[in-house]
Amino acid sequence: MFKHITRTVWLLSLVSLLNDFSSEMLYPVIPLYLKQIGYTTIIIGLLEGVAELIAGFSKIYMGRLSDSFQRRLPFIQVGYLLSILSRPLVGFTASLALIFTVRSIDRIGKGIRSGARDALLAEECQEENRAEVFGFHRSMDTAGAILGPLVAMVYLYFHPADYRTIFIITLAPGILASLCTFLLKEKTQDVVTARSFSFRKNFSFYKEAPSSYLKFLGLLLLFGIANSSDMFLLLRAKETGLSEANVILLYMLFNLVYAVFAFPIGKLADKYGRMNMLIIGLIIYTITYLIFGYTQHIFMISAAFIGYGLYYAFTQSTLKALLLERVDTSQKSSAIGFYEGVNSFFLLGSNALAGWVWYQFGATSMFTYSSVIAFIVLLLMIRQSKSTA
């Protein structure tokens, strides 16, 4: 079952598990904490969007730089360390400027490591089993996203609204994740590229990217307009009158579904077609967001979180494999970094727009427009799939 999973893939997956244990302990807590200290959904949306925008610049630049040097480990090690050390600081200030600063450092850390980590994963597998390897990594990563909220939920059960202590607890699994990165090894690369720190060159991957990559990227970015922060789903659940513990429990349910299905769906994608899996994921997303928008019944909201977990399982590993199969061997980190970086720019607008629509017209309107855009992308994806078949 795990014959394609190498030692490096196991270690990278363990690092991601521990890091997500740390970060996802905070993810469902941060919007609750920000609302507790007086910030609106508009501010929360803008904060997350701007932080992702800054991360986007680092993803593009660092992804390109990793390919330029054909090195992965230094970017992975520094990236994780930055996030782990900055993450707990959010809970010790009510200043928007300081919260923004430490959130940005956390996101920059992710930007530094993301492209290099995915490139290292790609280098540990063959093209025909790439979605399987990425699916395994996502399953392990998401297992950490279950453990983190579980610890947060148990703590908040005994200490309601005591968010700041949770920020401190995140240091333990985070530091362990950082230490594990020093057990990793990377293969010596035979590909020789021109090393460059040039901002202009490292931000211009689009000039040399294959047209098939750019066309597919365009559809993913259009979907980015609809795909706002998951924090809005948590706020929607809280709006139904659920307790903090139950909101976190639903977030754990989403991550459990994602963790269970990411690996087997990755194997299916390699066997039956990655684009087919991506299209199924978009169908699930469209339906799920309509459920979030038009019901506040606990049973349907729970079903929507299950659906959202399936959407992630069907799309996150397959879209990376689809991106990588459209570029050369020496462009792996650039391809992932450029996608995630530019997508961060779209997330800024998406989060700001989602927060504004929710504030002005209510949650139903926000989830409806997201569903409509996702449906349009779905139709365009099917059309592109048929044209390249």
Image (cartoon, rainbow, N blue to C red):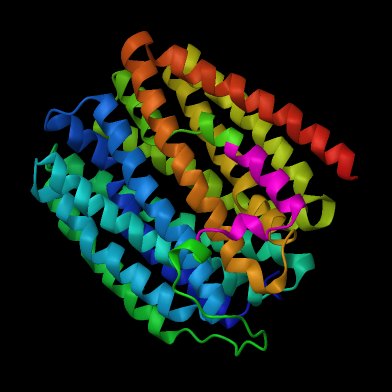
Question: Which residue shows up at 78% across the image and 42% down it?
Answer: 276
- Picture quadrant of residue 127: bottom right
Read off the magenta span. Answer: 203-221
Question: How many numbered discs?
Answer: 0
Q: Give the quadrant of residue 17.
A: bottom left
Residue 204 falls inside the magenta stretch: yes
Residue at image coords 44%, 31%: 350
Judge whether residue 76 is colored magenta.
Answer: no
- Measured as percent of width and height from the top left, residue 232 is found at 38, 29
Is 388 on the left or on the right of 195, as rendered? right
With respect to residue 190, does 383 lie above or below? above
Expressed as whole percent of the image width and height from the top left, the position of residue 142 reads 47, 54
Instruction: Quadrant for residue 228, please give it.
Output: top left
User: Front-most of 364 and 379?
Assistant: 379
Percent of width and height locating residue 272 = 83, 51
In this rendering, does residue 5 appear at all?
A: no
